[in-house]
Amino acid sequence: MKPRLYRPHGALTRFVEYFWTFEWGERDTVRTLSMFATGVSGILLQHYDGRPALGSTVSARRASRGGCPTAFVYGKRTRPMQTFSNGPFRLMGVVFRPQGLRMLLNTDPVALNDRSAGLGEFSREQLGDQLLNAKDDQERVARLSKFLRTRVDGARAEDLLVTEALELIRRDIWSIRVPQLLKRLQVSERHLERRFAGAIGVSPHQYIRILRFREALHLMKAGQFDRLSDVAYDLNYVDQSHFIKDTKALSGYTPKQLVTMVDAGVDLPCALIETPRESYFAATARQHELTIAAGNDRATRM
C-alpha cells in the first residue's frame, strides 16, 4: 500500500517536487499518523465522503482541539506531531521544493513552521470545495496544478545563494557542517542564516540536522545496515548517544523503536501510518512461542 505520485510539468517543476494521492480503506479502526521533522512543506487535502477524516494534532508542546482542516497549506515540521483517523480516509497533496512555499505562495515560511493555514487564505475561488467535489483524484491533481500554475508569473525570485547552499548540503549531507558551508560560500554565518531562514524557514544548522535524520530514515526503510550504530557512523554523528538524541527529538522515538515502526507501517509523504503496537507485540509473542515449541519438538525427537 503506497501513495501514487504525479510529477509536475513545465514551469511548475521549479517549485513543486510532486503531487500525490492515497486512500486508506479500513473501517472501524483507529490509526495513528506520526508526522516527523522531514523539512518539507506542501498542501494537503484530507477527507472521506466530503468530510474531514483526521482528528486533532498532538505535539510534545501542545494539542490542537477539533479536527484538522479539510484543505490546508503546511510549513516545515521541526518536531514530531501526531494525528489520528477513525476509519477510512483519502489524502491528496503537493510537496514543494525547498523554496517553493515562499516563491509560489508568496508567504513567510518561518510563520508556517510546525503549523498550517487554511487553503482559503491563498485562494479566493473556494479551491478546497472544488477539490472535494472533483470526480476523482486525477481531476483533483489537475485542479490543484492549474491553481499553482496561475501563480507562476507572480512568483518571488529564487534566492541563488540559498540554492547553492542547498546543493552543497544535498551533495555532502554525510559530512557537511555549517563552518564548511560558510567557507565554500564565502559568507558570514549571520548573513547565511538570515537568507536561508527567509527562503527555507529554518537555519542551515537545523536543515542539515533534519536532512541527516531523513537520510537515516531512508537507510532504516531500506534495511541498509547490520547494526543501528552503523547508521550513526555512516552519517558522521559524533557518537551513538548523539544519534539517539537527534532521532528522538525529530521523530519522538528511539532509533530501535523507529526501525520497527518503519518496517511495519505505511509511509506517506506527510506521515507514517502506524501499525498498532499491540499487534506488533502480539506477533512477536506468537513468534517467540513458535520458536520455543519448535525447540521442544526437536528435543522430543532427539
Image (spheres, rainbow, N blue to C red):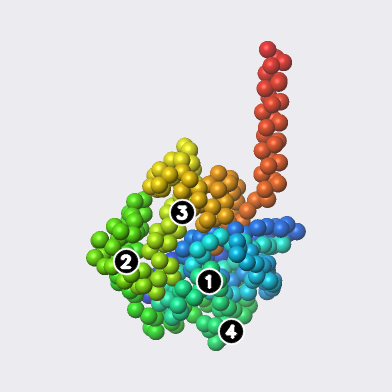
127 left or right of 14? right
Q: Residue at x 53, y 61 (%)?
A: 79
N-term mark: 1 or 3: 1
- The disc at residue 74 is 1
Residues under numbered marks 1 and 2 in contact, where contact means CB atoms less than 8 Å apart: no
Residue 132 seen in the current view: yes
Q: CA distance from mark 1 to mark 2?
A: 28 Å
- The disc at residue 213 is 3
Three-letter code, disc 1: Tyr
Front position among marks 3 and 4 = 3
Q: Residues within 10 Å of mark 3 (few under 14, many from 20)?
A: many
Q: Is residue 30 above or below residue 161?
A: above
- The disc at residue 126 is 4
Q: Residue at x 68, y 62 (%)?
A: 85
N-term mark: 2 or 4: 4
Residue 178 found in image quarter: bottom left
Q: Could you say where residue 235 lies in the image, as x and y percent from the top left?
A: 40, 48
Looking at the rendered structure, the secondary structure element under dot 4 is loop
Three-letter code, disc 3: Phe
Front position among marks 1 and 3 = 3
Residue 232 found in image quarter: top left
Looking at the rendered structure, the secondary structure element under dot 1 is strand
Q: Which residue is mark 2?
A: 189
N-term mark: 3 or 4: 4
Front position among marks 1 and 2 = 2
Residues under numbered marks 3 and 4 in contact, where contact means CB atoms less than 8 Å apart: no
Three-letter code, disc 4: Gln
